[in-house]
């Protein structure tokens, strides 16, 4: 099976320069971070699996590497479901703003500010601060379970 | 390797009752449709790979079935890139509204009404009707290429 072409870091790419969030696990080919900043304000259970090399599209990877990446996404999703008990997990690889391959793994709840719309839709209701605080209290255990995964 | 648990159709699930769009390819385990309706008005190059059985989460599938599904998504993405030359492909499995496992494969363009925001964000500019019409003119060839895939 052919391997993915070797990519060089892009000077203007934030995901080549920085981890891109709170580093939870580092693998030779990818890393797992938990989102910080505005995304995490509304959706605390927001992880990303970021391919380390600078490639834009998932199908820029060789099939074996795609599988490596998706197996990692599946492991993160499994831990998120177990630890955070979301109503639904949302998975997405968009990369329009930062075209460096990464997968969003987001715990969604029927009480969150956008549900059932996609998290990028306008807010349908105010944040439920008490529930968000309770969810934030579960994050360290979820982080630890992801960090303990054997990828 | 264990197989996925057998799911029964859900009476109130539109993706158990109907194809869910213009049927492009049917496989024993999944189907590929092209979106119709409002989604297609703004994003004509909008395909979905829909698992036939009613399961909610990607990790509800056994690993081998997850791989079957993602290999299909990769093949559809590859055809979309070749036939429609998007600025970026967007992949997502959300299922908040219809919790029946399906993957969105969407051709995005730097001139589309939301770019670079996610397609579910509010419109940033009016539709470019001439470019949308040109894109629609490419869809039958893309459909045919997807229909000709060996899954």
Image: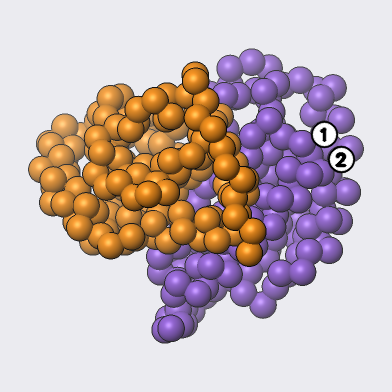
Chain colours: A purple, B orange
Seen at 82% across and 34% down, the residue is A135
Instruction: Give me the chain letter of mark 1.
Output: A
Q: Is residue B14 visible?
A: yes
Label 1 secondary element:
helix
Residue B80 falls in image quadrant: bottom left
Label 2 secondary element:
loop
Front residue of B144/B139: it is: B144
Label 1 CA crowd tier, 10 Å (few <14, some 14–19, many 20+): some
Seen at 52% across and 25% down, the residue is B10
Instruction: Give me the chain letter of mark 2.
Output: A
Q: Position of residue B148 (x, y in %)?
A: 20, 58
**Label of residue B105 in the image:** none
Seen at 77% across and 36% down, the residue is A85
**Label of residue A135 in the image:** 1
Residue A22 higher or lower than B132, as above or below: below
Q: Position of residue A63 (x, y in %)?
A: 45, 72
Quadrant holding the N terminus of chain B: bottom right
Same chain assignment for discs 1 and 2: yes
> How many angstroms separate mark 1 from mark 2 (CA)?
5 Å
Seen at 43% across and 41% down, the residue is B52
**Label of residue A138 in the image:** 2
Q: Position of residue A60 (x, y in %)?
A: 40, 69
| Residue A65 shown left or right of residue B124 in the figure | right
Residue B44 higher or lower than B64, as above or below: above
**Circles 1, 2 touching at the beta carbon (< 8 Å):** yes
Q: Position of residue A105 (x, y in %)?
A: 63, 47
Q: How many marks?
A: 2
Label 2 CA crowd tier, 10 Å (few <14, some 14–19, many 20+): some
| Residue A49 shown left or right of residue A143 in the figure | left
């Amino acid at each position: 099976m052919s391997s993915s072409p070797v990519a060089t870091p892009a000077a203007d790419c934030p995901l080549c320069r920085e981890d891109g969030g709170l580093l939870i696990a580092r693998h030779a080919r990818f890393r797992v971070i938990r989102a910080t900043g505005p995304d995490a304000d509304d959706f605390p259970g927001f992880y990303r699996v970021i391919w380390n090399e600078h490639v834009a599209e998932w199908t820029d990877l060789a099939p074996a590497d795609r599988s490596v990446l998706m197996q990692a996404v599946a492991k993160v999703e499994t831990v998120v479901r177990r630890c955070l008990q979301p109503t639904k997990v949302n998975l997405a690889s968009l990369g329009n703003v930062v075209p460096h391959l990464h997968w969003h793994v987001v715990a969604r709840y029927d009480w969150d500010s956008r549900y059932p719309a996609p998290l990028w839709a306008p807010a349908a209701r105010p944040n439920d601060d008490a529930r968000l605080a309770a969810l934030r209290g579960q994050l360290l255990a979820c982080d630890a379970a992801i960090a303990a995964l054997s990828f």
